[in-house]
Image (tube, helix red, strand yellow):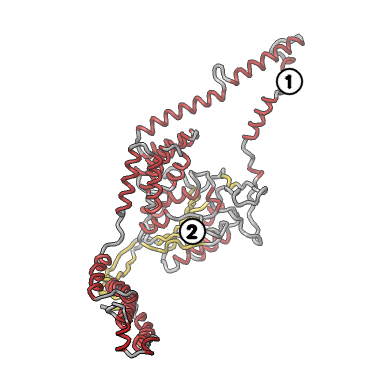
Amino acid sequence: MRFLYPEFIYLMLIPAALLVYLISTNKDRLERVFDPKTLERLRISGDSLGRKGHNLLAFAAFFFMTLALAQPVIEEGEMRIKSKGADIVIALDLSRSMDAADFYPDRFSFAKQKIEEILPKLPAGRIGLVGFTSASFVIAPLTEDRETVSFLLKRLDQGGVTAEGTDILSALRGAEKLLRKSSAKKVLLVTDGGDAKDMEKVSEFVEKNGIELIVWMVATDRGAPIPMSASAPEGKEKVVISRANRALREPAQRSGGLYVPATLSQADEREILAHLNEESASEREYERVVHKRIQLFYYPLFLALVMLPFALYSVGSRRNALSILFLSVPYFLSPTQAKAGIMDFALIKKAERAYAEGEYNTSTKAFEKLSASKPKNEVWFDLAGSYYKSGRYQMALQTYRKIVTSDRKLEMAKLYGMANSFVKLGDLEKGAALYRRVLEMGEDEDARANLELVLKLLREQKRKKKGGPGGEEENRKEKKGGSAEKASAKDGAKPGSAKSAEVSRKLSKAEERKWMQLIQKQPLKSKLYPLTPPEEEQNVNPW
């Protein structure tokens, strides 16, 4: 047996000696006034340990905690692990522009889902995760534990980030720090690119540090507006359109990497994996030495935790002390918290029973309590179902969006529930799009039947807008034609003649109002919102 960190023992020697001195020499006020025999008669406490006993237990607990910090282990030898594949750092954009909705439900959520899908398939030795805005943040250091990276990725959000803007160079600097000791350096940059057009410094940085840059562009060329009204001063709200920054293609290609636009299908994932697999086949294997050890720190830690309550509190007679010790041992030896406690099981049963009986408000309250203590995908799914059944479709959508999973069946069920919610809210086009996504993932009779029904309703809506038999548009044309014929008859012209075509009339207020609504619905031209790159002296744009 040996200690991995023996310096803790040496550092604790002086405080331990001081503690022993204080325990052995210090006396309270009563002991300074009365002799021990008199003091023993005056005491009414039934504490069998006494002051010295408590002090000795405190010292013993301190000693065992020190041993636990020194981390005792039993060496079982070395193990050599052969690995193949370069280390990869995934740099994910956390800026405000990732809130744009040209990918559903927004760029950031879409990017997380894409990374989650590709993560288990990456041919890499170790994987790290970095978030960035105008500064970079290490979320997960280089590790072979992909489940941990996935766990951290699922719980990553933009809410806790204080820095604003998009700085690609900052992202690469953060990734390079993690890859500094790696033989081959690869960075998978998942971003919309920001709005900077001059990428010369980025190209110089990746070439200087030997980084292979793979850009995964999560934005479209058409772009989408960034939600900024919440942060803009009142009365000064502006619209900013964020588009894919194709300027990142050059540094990616110069580094020997790849520029891949994100797609709704898995074509982009296949392109990235094909590129990495091709390079991985030519990379040589490397060997790492791993020490096999049996950890023993929890034994002294257990003894310290058992002694500490007796050192701090009075336990009465020796019989009471032994009883407390006997009852506390099973508590310390019990396994860690189970997946669901007794109260959780009772809450689950209550929620499921209420849901089955149609008491959806009751089941919703139960699932809300459960989600607060057990925020898991299954609980979110049940809560969303309760919201849907109780008619709160917007809440159902928000809850469905919290589900991030690689399980195909659960993802299909989530998308199906979201599609139903959109249909109930009257957004048939989004509902149809989600039904199609469900069918792309696998056959589902309910989704197909609902899709056919929604498409039928959409066709009816379009027919009514265009004006079918007896529709508004046809009636308007008939009225317009009749009035034109009357006007032409007065002037002695035939309907449809040149003279008839010249006849004009003033629009009615209803028609004028309708034309104004049509004009307002027309998309504004992009030249009204130019995205100019910031000057070097200026601050980075907050998006």
The quadrant the N terminus occupies is bottom left
Up the image or down, 234 lies above or below 494; here it is below
Q: x, y (%) of residue 207?
A: 51, 63
| Res 83 → quadrant | bottom left
> Dot 1 corresponds to which residue?
505
Q: Is residue 260 left or right of residue 472?
A: left
Q: Position of residue 253 (x, y in %)?
A: 50, 55
| Residue 525 shows up from this direction | yes
**Tag 1 secondary structure:** loop
Locate residue 476, reporting x and y percent: 63, 19
Foreground pick, 352 / 12: 352
Which residue is under mark 2? 131
Q: Amino acid at mark 1?
A: Arg
Q: Position of residue 175 (x, y in %)?
A: 47, 63
Mark 1 Cα-neighbour bin, 10 Å: few <14, some 14–19, many ≥20: few
Q: Give left or right: position of 508 versus 320.
A: right
Amino acid type, callout 2: Gly
**How far apart in space, not on screen, are marks 2 and 1 (Cα)?**
62 Å
The answer to whether residue 206 of the structure is visible from this angle is: no
Identify the residue at horizontal 44%, vertical 42% (top origin).
Answer: 396
Tag 2 near tag 1, CB within 8 Å: no
- Tally the numbered discs: 2
Q: Is residue 81 left or right of residue 414?
A: left
Which of the marked residues, 2 or 1, is nearer the chain's N terminus?
A: 2
Picture layout, residue 428 above or below residue 101? above
Please tell me which residue lies in front, 65 or 138. Answer: 65
